Amino acid sequence: MTMPDRPGALATLAQECGAAGVNILAMQVFPGVGSVTDDFVLEVPPEWDTDAVAALVERAGARAVVSHPCGEQALGDQPTRYVEAARAILARPARFPEIVAALFDADAEQADRPSPTDSMEMTVGDVSVQIHRAVPFTATEHARGATMAGLVSDVLQRAKDAGVGPTPARRLGTGSAPDYVVTSHCVAAEVAGTPMGRAVLAELVTPGCRLLTLEVDPAWRRRGIGSRLLMEAARAAARLGDDELLLRTSPDNLAVMPMVLGSGLRARVRLSGDVLSVRVPLRDLESAGR
């Protein structure tokens, strides 16, 4: 709800709640200019619905009220939630959309929410992530989201700069740099004629958007091969006249976010169910001189 920024506004709300037998269990305050956005967790009589809650707080001067049922998780300590979310994201960067959506009581997929919705966009490196919900995001929440995304960007960049590689070679030629063999619909990474990874341009899922399959031999991962394959595949798709590449993978794929960041390509990440989708617009190739 939005409350007027004046002394006694919350006291009026507390008085209305007390008279109606409503218990205030928790609250967050998001300061603004001239008004304040307040997030309350209320324990109300069992027969109440969201309209009854709205009527109660509006009598106390609240505006722009959105109410919905919630569980005990809403009573969790907010700083603790942010620390736990940061730990979860650093352990599985590809789950960033899912984890940060839960943190802000939002959805990673816009279709999961009735309209109208508000969206918040965060950028990890050059990867864009959006989350959506019915309640407008406050300036404070936008700042928290940007800080969380910045933390993930820093950690992934440090891991890239550290150049952590795989265990010592387990096959002939693992000390050599791969050659990249490009055809119209495939890019193969090879060492001495032995394939180490490949990216295949598959069918068009929609006009201008082509599905990409990409894999790298486990012994050759964390060497930037996936990023190079993605870049070369993007160039090949652009030559075919495609507008966008679509890569689908599991949310537990720890390599996908570092791979996209390492390629230098811009991308949009979306989590829907058990599928993490990465869309790479190809118009950026020409504008970036790649």
Image: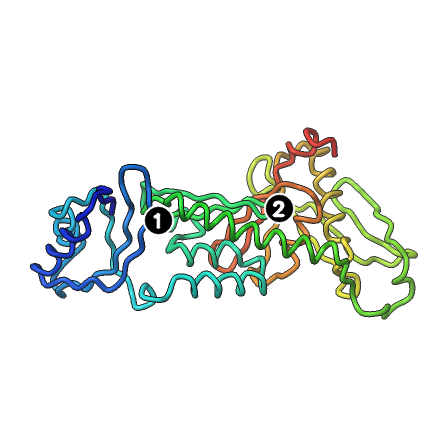
The disc at residue 113 is: 1
Please determine whether, in this image, residue 86 is positioned above or below residue 210. Answer: below
Residue in view at x 42 percent, y 62 percent = 79
The location of residue 260, given as percent across then percent down, is 66, 49
SS of the residue under disc 2: loop
Q: In terms of image quadrants, where is residue 241?
A: top right
Q: Nearer the viewer, residue 13 or 189?
A: 13
Residue in view at x 87 percent, y 50 percent = 179
Q: Nearer the viewer, residue 80 or 211?
A: 80
Figure disc tally: 2
Residue in view at x 70 percent, y 30 percent = 286
The location of residue 48, given as percent across then percent down, is 13, 59
Tell me the residue that label 2 is attached to. Answer: 125
Please determine whether, in this image, residue 12 is positioned above or below residue 236. Answer: below
SS of the residue under disc 1: loop
Could you tell me the amino acid type at mark 1? Arg
The location of residue 94, given as percent across then percent down, is 57, 57
Q: Nearer the viewer, residue 72 or 154?
A: 154
Asked if residue 168 lies left or right of residue 3, the reply is: right
Asked if residue 262 lies left or right of residue 268, the reply is: right
Crowding around mark 2 (Cα neighbors within 10 Å: few <14, some 14 to 19, many 20+) is: many
Crowding around mark 1 (Cα neighbors within 10 Å: few <14, some 14 to 19, many 20+) is: some
Q: In terms of image quadrants, where is residue 32?
A: top left
Cβ–Cβ below 8 Å for labels 1 and 2? no
Asked if residue 119 lies left or right of residue 54, the reply is: right
The disc at residue 251 is: none
The location of residue 174, given as percent across then percent down, is 88, 62
Asked if residue 276 lies left or right of residue 118, the reply is: right
Could you tell me the amino acid type at mark 2? Gly
* Quadrant (top left/top right/bottom left/bottom right) for the C terminus: top right
